Amino acid sequence: MGRVLFIQWKVDKGFRISIVSSGVEKHECHNLERTRNPQERCYEQGDGDTDLAVLKLETWGRMWYIKDQATVSWGNSASIPVPGDYDGDGDTDPAVYNDGTWYIKDQFVDTWGDSSSIPVPGDYDGDGDTDLAVYKVEPWGGMWYIKDQAAFVWGNSASIPVPGDYNGCGNIDIAVYNDGTWYIMDQFVDNWGDALSYPLPAPDTNGDGDPWH
């Protein structure tokens, strides 16, 4: 069987190619941003490494302790931490989610979701900034609502949302985990773990500071 190429252009971000061969779809990614000098990109995106940071509920609010940088008070006992690069400047912004309201420090406040939604922020369109998104179990299945983009049915009441860049294309893929089975939308299904396992990395879905509950 021949190779069929489907090319989806992303302005200033390269393009994505899906190859279908022998009935199996394979994703390859060509991102023009990745071909640039790594040192040049490092200056644009903070210092390029991951910083140590913890979130602690103090008597006066939720405190963000970022090692060798700053201490920030942002959130309360009901807040779920949702740090991300919401303005696309290359560094991570303190942010919290409270029952459908997103509070992005020094940027904006927006409403997307409700008290029964799980925040799953990420760069779903590959444009370099973090998008507001929630996972919510509806009567017909697990819904992914991505602000200003789309809504997808993927998962069920037993699913744990595990969004991530599973094919290295630079954008976040929709994915769920069910008792050891990983369902990555439009890519693959694989078994790794069991009903007693918890997928990593995992979001703190109820804001208690423990991803296991």
Image (spheres, grey):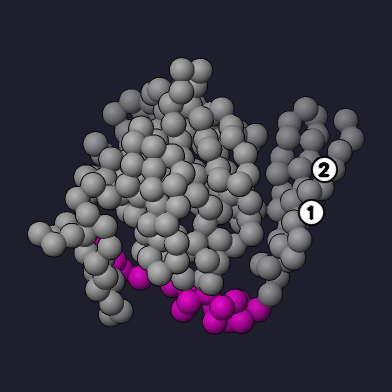
Q: Nearer the viewer, mark 1 or mark 2?
A: 1
The residue range painted magenta reads: 37-55
The image quadrant where one finds the C terminus is top left
What amino acid is at disc 1? Trp
Q: Label 1 vs label 2: CA separation?
A: 10 Å
Q: What residue appears at the point 35 percent right and 70 percent down from the top-left corner?
A: 51
Q: Does 34 sit left or right of 19 as displayed? A: left
- Front residue of this view, candidates 163 and 2: 163
The reply to whether the magenta stretch includes residue 95 is no
Percent from the top left, x then y, of residue 203?
Answer: 36, 45
What is the x, y in percent for residue 76? 22, 54
Query: Which residue is nearer to you in this view: 155 or 107?
Result: 107
Q: Which residue is mark 1?
A: 9
Image quarter of the N terminus:
top right
Most extreme residue toward the top, as rendered? 139
In this rendering, position of residue 70 left or right of residue 22:
left
**Residue 174 % position (x, y):** 55, 39
Is label 1 in contact with label 2 (beta carbons under 8 Å)?
no
Residue type at tag 2: Phe
Residue 86 image position (x, y, % from top left) = 49, 62
| Helix, strand or loop for disc 1 | strand
Does residue 53 show up magenta in the picture? yes
Against 38, is 131 above or below?
above
Which dot marks residue 6? 2
Foreground: 187 or 91?
A: 91
- Inspect this view and state whether residue 70 appears: yes
Q: Residue at x 24, y 73 (%)?
A: 71
